Image: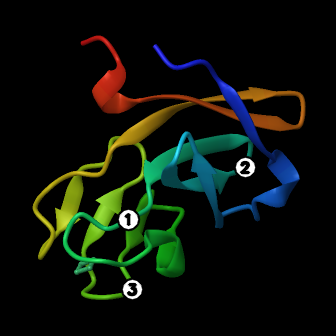
Amino acid sequence: MAAFETVAKLDDIPDEGCKQIIVRGDVVGLYRVGDDVYALGDVCTHEEAYLTDGDFDAEELEVECPRHGSRFNVVDGSVRILPATRPEPTYEVKIEGDLVLVGARSSEMSP
Ligand code: FES
């Protein structure tokens, strides 16, 4: 199981916004809603695009791909709107004080 790594300060992520980071070679988007942060694979599973370049809907907890408009839930990675069909990986997140730590990718976690 991957150890948690400090990747950002909470205030580096705009509230109801996002920030791209690299963790263990993966490009990951951090999405913030108040004191909650979600981590989602940032490369669209449809074609090449960064989801953090798209629009984050903080109310629905969905991000829209800037390229063809697929929407992904940032909590569980599920596809909400086609053309993408494969879900995004998610990552464990911990907040310690004002630091954001990212842990294992969903595919590495035990069921
Ligand atoms: S590249 Fe994201 S929907 Fe096509």
Q: Residue furthest bottom?
A: 67
Name the residue that disc number 1 marks.
43
Name the residue that disc number 2 marks.
34
| On screen, residue 7 above or below 62 | above
* Eye-nearest disc, 3 or 1: 1
Name the residue that disc number 3 marks.
66
* Eye-nearest disc, 2 or 1: 1
Quadrant of res 89? top left
| On screen, residue 33 above or below 37 | below
Tag 1, which secondary structure? loop
75 or 87: nearer the viewer: 87
16 or 105: nearer the viewer: 105
- Which quadrant of the figure contains the C terminus? top left
| On screen, residue 34 above or below 54 | above
- View quadrant of ligand 1: bottom left
Q: Amino acid at mark 2?
A: Gly
* Eye-nearest disc, 3 or 2: 3
Horizontal side of 87 relative to 110 (left or right) equals left
